[in-house]
Image (cartoon, rainbow, N blue to C red):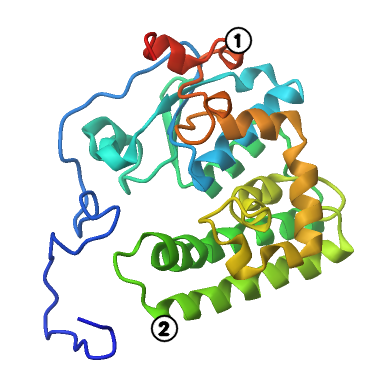
Amino acid sequence: MSDSVYTPPAVWTWNKANGGQFASINRPIAGPTHEKVLPVGKHPLQLYSLATPNGVKVTVMLEELLQAGHTGAEYDAWLIRINEGEQFGSGFVEANPNSKIPALVDHSGPEPIRVFESGAILVYLAEKFGAFLPTEPAKRAECLAWLFWQMGSAPFLGGGFGHFYAYAPTKIEYAIDRYAMEVKRQMDVLDRRLAEHRFLAGDDYTIADMATWPWYGLLAKGQLYGAGEFLQAHTYTNVVRWADEIAQRPGAKRGRMVNRVMGEPSSQLHERHDASDFDTKTQDKLNPTS
């Protein structure tokens, strides 16, 4: 049925056969679907994630902290395959009742601390290690404003444009046009800001950049949803300049690899438990015959 003739029913009911790439795992209720205890590695920081843009935010942050000499940021990164419903295991739901990656559990204190939502994890780590979040009030406010801008804006790019352009079983002109317009407006917001500043919060690289780059930086480089040409993303030249600079950072390069299961094999590190895993890939250990 086309969207032009659809009339919503008086009461919506869950249709399990609604189609789409993620139809088998999307549901209108919360809570676990099965019992599964989360593994715990040797480091205080335990990350449970997948290298979607939201997951990449946190692995970039952890690798940037290590690059900056914060040895306490050593971590184990466990792969959560969301297309297989692993985010609905009982242990993951304990770490994140919203059943979305990423989830972090900090075992460095007397009691484990769970942190969920990617923006909250970035702030938690920035405050824990005193890095990548300015302390001067005006600069801190600017950084947090751009961080929360990203958290509020990206759903229009991902769940809105990305879903209807790349994943929806039926291409709906109105939905694609609506979200394409909004994404291009967001790119213009970023482009205007980055025309005047090296990074989003000013002269310094911060968690605002780490949060935004995996979404809008990859879009600017034509690496998100295959939509670069459709949105003419390359025309936002200041965003492209910013994205290229971040992509050359060693921490960003490593962070993008962690929990990655797509792309060239050389770009993937399924799990990360030690810095040496970047040389001896975790997936080779998990799948020695592959």
**Among the 4 quarters of the image, the one containing residue 231:** bottom right
**Residue 233 versus residue 124: which sits nearer the camera?**
233
| In the depicted structure, whether residue 15 falls above or below residue 70 | below
Q: Is residue 170 depicted above or below 206 in this figure?
A: below
Q: CA distance from mark 1 to mark 2?
A: 49 Å
Disc 1 marks a residue whose amino acid type is Ser
Q: Is residue 262 left or right of residue 14?
A: right
Residue 200 place in picture, x, y as percent: 76, 56
Q: Which mark is residue 208?
A: none
Secondary element under disc 1, as helix, strand or loop, is helix
* Residue 152 vertical position relative to residue 86 in the rendered view, above or below: below
Q: Which residue is mark 2?
A: 174
Res. 105 in view: yes
Asked if disc 1 and disc 2 are in contact, CB closer than 8 Å, the reply is no
| Quadrant of the snapshot with the C terminus | top left
Question: Which residue: 25% across, 24% down?
Answer: 37
Picture coordinates of residue 187 (x, y %)? 67, 68
From the viewer's perspective, tell me whether residue 156 is left or right of residue 4: right
Q: Which amino acid type corresponds to the residue marked 2 in the rendered image?
A: Tyr
Residue at image position (22%, 33%) is 90
The x, y position of residue 154, in whole percent, is: 53, 61
Q: Which residue is mark 1?
A: 276
Quadrant assignment for the N terminus: bottom left
Spot occupied by residue 262 in the image (x, y as percentages of width and height): 47, 36
Mark toward the viewer: 1 or 2: 2
Q: Residue at x 36, y 72 (%)?
A: 171
Could you tell me how many numbered marks the image carries? Answer: 2
User: Which label's residue is closer to the chain start, 1 or 2?
Assistant: 2
Q: Classify mark 2: helix, strand or loop.
A: helix
- Say if 184 sits above or below 283 in the image: below
